[in-house]
Amino acid sequence: MSTLAAARADNFYYPPEWSPKKGGLNKFHGQHALRERARKLDQGILIIRFEMPFNVWCGGCSSMIGKGVRFNAEKKQVGNYYSTKIWSFSMKSPCCQHEIVIHTDPKNTEYVIISGAQRKTEDFDVEDAETLLLPADEERDKLADPMYKLEHQGEDIRKKKEEEPVLVRLQRLSDSRHSDDYSLNRTLRDRLRSQKKRVAEEKKSARKMGLGVRLLPPSAEDAAAAGPVRVASDF
């Protein structure tokens, strides 16, 4: 039996003293299927792998914990928002073992730091990030007002008319570049071929001069800078 087959067989071994009346193997051995992760299940706590959803500052030593860092966290339910459960995640910081507690916020679809850390404030420009700015809570409440919603729609229509020429121009540019894939591919291959040829010639010139680097093409600025330079000769 191969090593892999033997490892898999160990998980399905039924000892002679086992009988179907005693239930499954986990029940027979007096253990949970999740093993150590379920050691606090009687307290409503399950050990999971939790990934930090944003950059935070540790409350114990002020070190930054980056977004995506994973922890062995204790997960438990601490309440409800209507029919949605509110979960709590407790973990130890990797820098100083300071306890961090984070709750889910179903109302705002967000995570909230309860204790042990502080969320890093990161501002960005919506236009530079090329993304959408989600409305604030007050804005979403106002959108329920029919008159405000009508004014808001008018503003959206005005922005659409202002940006429509730019979108049309971008669409035309995209269509012109991708309307003929064969010609576009041929142009790119020709450009790459000439570029490789030029690079090979530059490397050849550098080798003739005993240089280990590729020389750049000559320019007027380089010629003007090298003009006043005089090299002393022994002859």
Image (cartoon, rainbow, N blue to C red):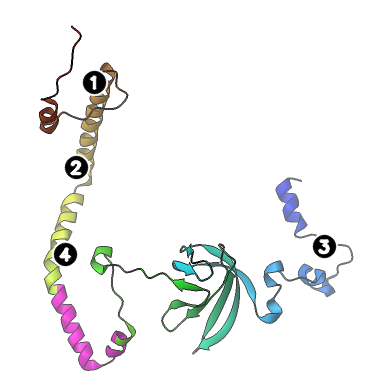
Q: In screen coordinates, is 213 left or right of 87?
A: left
Q: Which mark is residue 183?
A: 2
Is tag 3's residue or tag 1's residue first in the polypeptide sequence?
A: 3
Residue at numbered disc 4: 167
Q: Badges 3 and 2: C-beta atoms under 8 Å apart?
A: no
Q: Is residue 170 magenta?
A: no
Q: Which residues are magenta?
A: 139-160
Disc 2 residue type (three-letter):
Ser
Q: Main secondary structure of the magenta part?
A: helix
Residue at numbered disc 3: 14
- The residues tagged by marks 4 and 1 sit, at their Cα atoms, a distance apart of 47 Å
**Residue name at image x 14 percent, y 30 percent:** 222
Q: State the count of labels.
A: 4
Q: In screen coordinates, is 201 left or right of 78?
A: left
Residue 34, visible in the rendered structure = no
Element under disc 1: helix
Is tag 1's residue or tag 2's residue first in the polypeptide sequence?
A: 2
- The residues tagged by marks 3 and 1 sit, at their Cα atoms, a distance apart of 76 Å
**Residue name at image x 18 percent, y 29 percent:** 217
